Image (cartoon, rainbow, N blue to C red):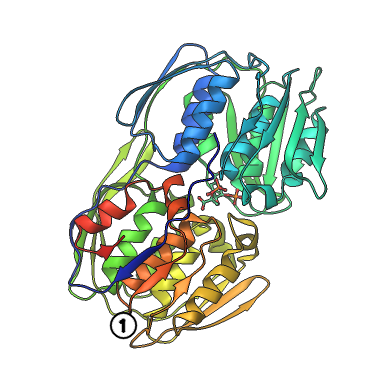
Amino acid sequence: MSHASEPRPMTARRRGALTGVANVPGDKSISHRALILGALSVGETHITGLLEGQDVLDTAKAMAAFGADVQRIGDGEWRVHGVGVGGFAEPADVIDCGNSGTSVRLIMGAMATTPITATFTGDASLSKRPMARITDPLSEFGAQIAAREGGRLPVTIGGATDPVPLRYKTPVASAQIKSAILLAGLNAPGETVVIESEPTRDHSERMLAGFGATIRTEQTEEGHVITLTGRPELRGQPVAVPRDPSSAAFPVAAALIVPGSEIRVPGVSRNPTRDGLYVTLKEMGADIGFENQREEGGEPVADLVVRHSPLSGVDVPADRAASMIDEFPILSVVAAFAQGKTVMNGVAELRVKESDRIDAMARGLEANGVTIEETRDSMTVHGMAKVPGGAEAATHLDHRIAMAFMVLGLASEAPVSVDDGSPIETSFPDFISLMQGLGADLG
Ligand SMILES: O=C(O)C1=C[C@@H](OP(=O)(O)O)[C@@H](O)[C@H](O)C1
Ligand SMILES: C=C(OP(=O)(O)O)C(=O)O
C-alpha cells in the first residue's frame, strides 16, 4: 500500500475542561502480533479489538501476500486462517510496510527461515530507519540479505534453506529485534535464545506461549534470557486485543494539563513492560486512578480515571526507557507544564524512530516558547507556569510528534499547529474525533 497522502495541517486551541470517556484503540504491538502469529498457525485465529490503523493494515496485507487467508468481518474483528510454521508462500509483489517499523522488522524475521524470497519497502521515514539490527542476526540463521547502503530499505531477503538456531545478545533494548529473532527461530530446529540487557515489551513471548510454542524467560547473570524451542505447531487462537497504553497517553496527558478536566479511559493494558509513562506521571504528582484491575486476553488491564493535576518535574531513569519508549514525546509536553525540570535519560533510541524524536520535540517546543536541552541520549524540559504556544511544529511523518503537539495546543496560551497530522492514521485513526468528544478544540 502506498501512503503518499496529502499533508494535513492541524491546529489545537485552548478551550474548557476535558470530560467524558475516551475509548482508545486496540494495542498496536499486540495487533501486529495477532495477525503474524495467526498467519503462522494452523487453524483459525479470531481477533477482536484489532487496531485498524494503517500500520496494522499493512501487516494484514503482508500476511495475505505470504499466503494466509486474512478477512475483516466487522469493526476490529478479523479472522486469520494461517499456513503453519514454515508454510509462508513467496509473495508475488514487493511488501510495502508504509510507515511501520514493527511490520517490516517482525515480518522479515517471520519469513527469514523459510526458503522463499521477499523484498521489503516503506515510506520516506521507514526508508531512513536502521534495518541491519534485524538483518545481521537473520543472516546468522542462514538468510541471504541485500540491503541499500547502511542497511536501509529496500531490503531483499532470501530465506534460509537449512536454518540454524541462534543465540543472540541484542545490541540495543528493542522488542522488535527480539521479536524478529524469535519469529525466525520458530522455523529453525533446536533452541533459539535472545539475551536482552534490559527487558523490553513481552507481547511476543506471551502470545507465542498462548499459540502453543515452548518459550521460557529467565533472569540470569547474562541478562534477560528468552529461550524458544523451534518447529512447534502453532494453533490458531482467539485474541482479544486490550486498548493501547501508548495511545491512551495522549488523552491522559491532555486531561492532566487542561484545568478542570476529568476523563475515564477504559480497558487499557497495564502490562508492566509498557507501564513506564504511568509510573513517571504518578511520580510527578498526577491524579490517575487504576480501577477494575482485571485480566483480559492474557494481559492485565484497568480503567484509568484521570484528573487535572499540579505536576512537578522528575528525573526519569535510563532503565525505565524501554517501558515507555514511545511515550517520551508526550511526556516532554506534560513536562512543559510541570514545576521544575524533567530529565529523560537513556533515550538515544528516540533518534531512530519514525523521526528523530528528540530533535523534533526540541525544535517544536522551542518554537512554542519552552526551554529544552538535548544530548545524544537525554532530553531536559524546563517546566513553566504558562506555556506560550503560538507556533507550528514539523511532524516529519511521525504520528506521535503530531499528537504530542496537538495536546500541547490544548493547554498553551496561544494555539499550536502542526504542518502535517496525516501520520496520526498509522496508530490512532480516531484521535481527532475522540479528543473532540472530550471537548477539545482541534482539527
Ligand atoms: O515491538 C513492538 O511492537 C514495538 C517496539 C518498539 O520499538 P523498538 O523495538 O525499536 O524499541 C516501539 O517503539 C514500537 O512502537 C513497537
Ligand atoms: C516507533 C513506533 O512504531 P514503529 O517502530 O512500528 O514504526 C511508534 O509507534 O511509536
136 and 51: which is toward the camera:
51
Q: Is residue 170 visible?
A: yes
Quadrant assignment for the C terminus: bottom left
* Residue 84 x, y percent position in the rendering: 58, 14
- Where is 424 relative to 157, above or below? below
Q: Residues within 10 Å of mark 1 (few under 14, many from 20)?
A: some
Q: Amino acid at mark 1?
A: Glu
Q: Quadrant of residue 260?
A: bottom left
SS for dot 1: loop
Q: Is residue 90 left or right of residue 14?
A: right
Which residue is drawn at the image coordinates 63% and 13% (left, top)? 87
Nearer to us in this view, 167 or 40: 40
Q: Which residue is mark 1?
A: 413
Front position in the image: 345 or 244: 244
Q: Is residue 287 among the parts visible in the rendering?
A: no
Estimate the x, y position of residue 14 in percent, counting from the top left: 26, 74
